[in-house]
Image (tube, rainbow, N blue to C red):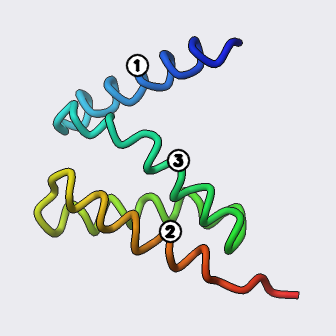
């Protein structure tokens, strides 16, 4: 599947989930930011940390203002932690 088709399908999925959960559709715009957090957690900690970390980012953002800035701030904190984490030997 070409990248454009992949991106379109992923965006469509995110909009469907936002609608089903009663969330603002603008949250789908954070796709790349959340994928970056997941990558940092998977590489800096371990693969299972990726979905758990993105969940916690969303939870933290929702507990604060819940707006774009809150998502970006929570994502930066989580990514920074993961990027500076030492891999266990």
Q: Is residue 3 above or below residue 81?
A: above
Quarter of the picture containing the N terminus is top right
Q: Is residue 9 above or below residue 65?
A: above
Residue lying farthest to the left in this orientation: 65
Residue under numbered circle 2? 79
Query: Which mark is nearer the camera, 1 or 2?
Result: 2
Q: Quarter of the image holding residue 27?
A: top left
Are circles 3 and 1 on residues that touch, CB within 8 Å?
no
Mark 1 / mark 2, whichever is N-terminal: 1
Residue 28: x, y in percent? 32, 34
Residue 6: x, y in percent? 59, 19
Alpha-carbon distance for marks 1 and 2? 25 Å
Residue under numbered circle 3? 35
Q: Label 1: how many residues lie within 10 Å, few (<14), some (14-19) or many (20+)? A: few
Q: Quarter of the image holding residue 82?
A: bottom right
Point 57% across, 14% down: residue:
4
Q: Label 2: how many residues lie within 10 Å, few (<14), some (14-19) or many (20+)? A: many
Q: Nearer the viewer, residue 1 or 23?
A: 1
Is residue 47 left or right of 52 when viewed as pictured? Answer: right
Alpha-carbon distance for marks 3 and 1? 16 Å
Is residue 83 left or right of 76 when viewed as pictured? Answer: right
Residue 23: x, y in percent? 19, 39
Residue under numbered circle 1? 12
Circle 2 sits in a helix, a strand or a loop, which is it? Answer: helix
Alpha-carbon distance for marks 3 and 2? 11 Å
Q: Label 3: how many residues lie within 10 Å, few (<14), some (14-19) or many (20+)? A: some
Circle 3 sits in a helix, a strand or a loop, which is it? Answer: helix
Circle 1 sits in a helix, a strand or a loop, which is it? Answer: helix
Q: Quarter of the image holding residue 63?
A: bottom left
Mark 3 / mark 2, whichever is N-terminal: 3
Mark 3 / mark 1, whichever is N-terminal: 1
């Amino acid at each position: 599947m070409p990248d454009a088709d992949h991106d379109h399908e992923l965006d469509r999925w995110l909009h469907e989930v936002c609608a089903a959960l009663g969330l603002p559709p603008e949250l789908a715009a954070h796709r790349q930011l959340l994928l970056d957090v997941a990558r940092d957690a998977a590489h800096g900690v371990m693969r299972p940390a990726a979905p758990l970390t993105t969940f916690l980012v969303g939870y933290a953002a929702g507990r604060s203002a819940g707006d774009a800035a809150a998502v970006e701030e929570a994502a930066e904190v989580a990514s920074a932690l993961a990027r500076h984490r030492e891999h266990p030997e």
